[in-house]
Image: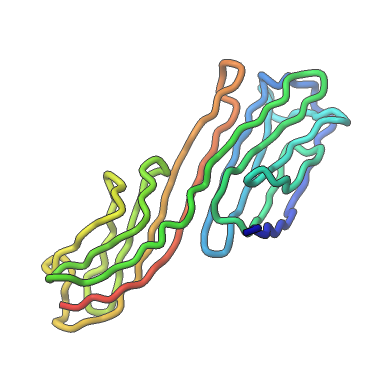
Amino acid sequence: MKRLLFVTLSSCVMLSTAPYTATRDMRLYVTIDSSAKGTHVTADITGPVGRIELGPNDSLGLLVDGAPIASARVTSFVFDVAARSGDFTFALHHEGDHDAKVDVLLVPPSDIHATSSAGKLLLDWTAFPNAGATTITVAGTCIVAQTIHVQTDTGHYELLAAQLQTLPEPCAVSLGLSRYLQTQVPIFGATFMYATVTQAETGEGQWTP
C-alpha cells in the first residue's frame, strides 16, 4: 500500500556569503517531532564559524523511506510531512568533495490502550526499547492522575487500584505515550549529525474497580 506524503516548505534559506566549507567540517542539526497531526522536521547545517556556503550544484535533501521529499541548494529547511514513521534520510551533495547521507529511524505509533482486570489497570502498547526514553500518562475523573517514566520498555505496565482509585466507580481513562531520543551519527571520524526525535500519541481505556 502506497503512503502519501504531504509536504509544506515553511522556510528555505540560501547562504552565499560565507567561505567554502569541506564536508568533514560540516555539522547537521536535526529535530523530528511526530504526533497525530504528522511529523515536523527541521534541519540546519553549519560549519566551524557558523554559516556556510553551498556551491551552485550542491544540495541538501530529505527522503522518507527512500522517497524524495525535497532537495535544494539550502543549508536549512523546515518541513511538515504526513508520515508518522519511517526511515528519514538527510542527504548532502557537495560537488568536488564527499557526499554525506545519514538516517534517523522514526518508529511506528505504539497503539497504547488500557483494560481493567482483577483490580488492576493494565496498560499495553507496542514496545520499541531503542526508540528513546518513554513516558506514559494516565488520567480520568475517578482516578488519581499518573505519570510513569518507563525504565524498560516491555510494552506492558500495571497499576493497582490502591494507586488509582479516588471514587468507587468506573470511568473512562485517557492515555498519553511520548518518546524522547537524542542521537549522533558520525562520518569521516567525527560527529556529523546531531538529531533530537520526539514522538507523542494518545489512547483510551476504561477503569472498572
Q: Quadrant of the N terminus?
A: bottom right
Q: Is residue 164 above or below residue 177?
A: below
Give x and y (percent) for residue 144: 22, 70
Instruction: Identify the residue shown where x is 48% and y is 35%.
Output: 183
Instruction: Identify the residue shown where x is 78% and y is 39%.
Output: 74
Give x and y (percent) for residue 143: 22, 74
User: Camera-side residue: 61 or 154?
Assistant: 154
Q: Quadrant of residue 137?
A: bottom left
Looking at the rendered structure, the number of numbered marks drawn on it comes to 0
Give x and y (percent) for residue 202: 42, 65
Give x and y (percent) for residue 57: 86, 30
Q: Is residue 137 above or below residue 40?
A: below
Q: Quadrant of residue 47?
A: top right
User: Camera-side residue: 32 or 108?
Assistant: 108
In this view, the residue farthest toward the right is 56
In this view, the residue farthest toward the front is 1
